[in-house]
Image (cartoon, grey):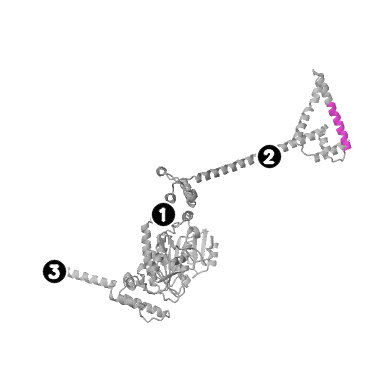
Amino acid sequence: MAPAAKINKKKGSETQRPPPKKKQKNDLVTEKRRPKKDDVLGDSDTDNPDEESEHQLEFSEDDEQEESASGSDVLSDGDDDPLADDFLQGGSDDEEKGSGSDSDSDSEEDSDEEDIEKKSRAIDEQRAREQKEAEEEMKLNIAEESDEFRLPTQKELEEEALRPPDIQSLQRRINEIVRVLSNLKDLKQEGSSRKDYVHQLKIDLCKYYGYNEFLIGALVEMFPVNELMELIEAFEKPRPTCLRTNTLKTRRRDLANVLLNRGVNLDPLSKWSKVGLVVYDSQVPIGATPEYMAGHYMLQSASSFMPVMALAPQEKERIVDMAAAPGGKTTYIAALMKNSGIIYANEIKAQRLRSLTANLHRMGVTNTIVCNYDGRELPKTLGLNTVDRVLLDAPCSGTGVISKDESVKISKTSEDIEQCAHLQKQLLLAAIDMVDANSKSGGYIVYSTCSIMVAENEAAVDYALKKRNVKLVPCGLDFGRPGFVRFRQHRFHPSLEKTRRFYPHVHNMDGFFVAKLKKMSNSIPSAGTGPSESVEQAYGLNETDREKSTSTEKVKSLTNGFPNDGTPENPSSAKRGMKRKIPSREEISKSREEKRAAYREANRNAAKNSRK
């Protein structure tokens, strides 16, 4: 009978499952009650005989249950009934008591762990619920506050001016004003107009980003408020470092492999450029590598590629770069021409000629003549209608390269813009006058600036369209925004849509403007007075200079294969020009010297007479 009980006990231990919580509590109660049997029986001093009889009856019932349980163990040998196992777990055998107590303690530990897990999960869920509700409430409060945004009063602004600037409050107010201006009809404050919001926005932008009032006002007039914020934020970040492969000495693939081996992380610039590379980071100075010293590449911004690509120089042409320093565009033109033809690289500032000539030598350029003239005087030096193409990257205010020069934020005024625009118009007319409209392959002028001001870009080109026989042609660039045809009260020629504008927040390059003009005729449209006379007066040409320029045109046209009988295109204008003779500089200087010599001679004679 003992072996059968052991077998059943093993089976019971294998198949037993942790009892539920209530059953465990009952077992604990019974275990606590069972040791009281000896105490009750051994207590001879009991005062209540009825209690003894009740305890005896209980113990007799327990004994009967133990005997029946032992009998059932024998009968249920080899039986796998789970009910029997559960019944056997309640037996009073000593060995079963020990195993039952162990299983009870294990089940208690498991149940306690389950309770802890359930409680922790409930706590986590409650916290997540509370956090979600708090976030929703915060969003609701922010939305309610933002809907109720009101402009600061004059008293609040005066108090704010006495305190140090609060950057966070300024930024919050800028964002709120931008949000209101984007939906002014629904969000504006009663009694406030768009002008009030724009005025406050200008003040806050000047304080937050450090601009002067003029420049912020000009940008606000040019862009919507959302795009304005993107542009200003783009000006605060530097543009990617780019370099241009010198195809006179290497190929882009070979150069990229060499630089990658030197620890330079780079990629091709874009699909629109076959020679550009963009540099992300470098373990060596990118401007001091052996390849740089050998002239295999030129550090050049991506926006500087555009004017040369629009110019599209051809081999064996005569090309003028009117503002050439430091030589990035000039060397690019020479590479496209494969060192053929002639390039006149002009630079008005003598101190910049050193960098220009150094880059020309380093890049292996051999077809370039460096000169130091005022661009407005170049037609007198090179002659009228003598070259095939002209590139004018005009000096400008630099409002497109604020990320490189932050002093532009506060240094530029309306007077500076007007002065730049006046100079640019003069240079553009000089560039047009140098180009030969009868050129076999050319006759093009490319005008570009690193400014985004309308007065320096569309207004200057529109002025040239009115003063000379030129027309705008497509730049040949597949991207970029078209130029302005109308701006505030100004109305420009419809063909200005063919010009291209580039912005840092759209194209990730410096702000730039490019226009390409085609010269239709060497004659100048009449405007009141004789056109030839006005041009000659502007350049100070006399009869001798006109003959020289005419002979130069004749020689050039013959060398290019064009017939030229030497007759002027506009005889009437030539006759009117002959009636009025303007002295040349040599004649003026000669007459001055004669006057000075006569004055000295008169002084000597007077001194001699006084001594006598």
Ranked by sequence position, the earlier of labels 2 and 1 is 2
For this view, does 291 lie left or right of residue 67?
left
User: As rendered, which of 122 and 149 lies closer to the eye?
Assistant: 149
The circle drawn on residue 118 is: 2
Q: Residue at x 81, y 37 (%)?
A: 86
Residue 155 within the segment the image draws in magenta: no
Q: Nearer the viewer, mark 1 or mark 3?
A: 1
The reply to whether residue 429 is visible in this rendering is: yes
User: As rendered, which of 108 and 207 lies closer to the eye?
Assistant: 207
Disc 2 residue type?
A: Lys
How crowded pointer 2 is (Cα within 10 Å; few <14, some 14-19, many 20+) is rated as few
Q: Which residues are magenta?
A: 59-76
**Vertical side of 137 occupied by 51: above or below:** above
Location of residue 474 in the rendering, given as x and y in whole percent from the top left corner: 47, 68
The circle drawn on residue 608 is: 3
Image quadrant in which the C terminus is located: bottom left
Q: CA distance from mark 2 to mark 3?
A: 127 Å
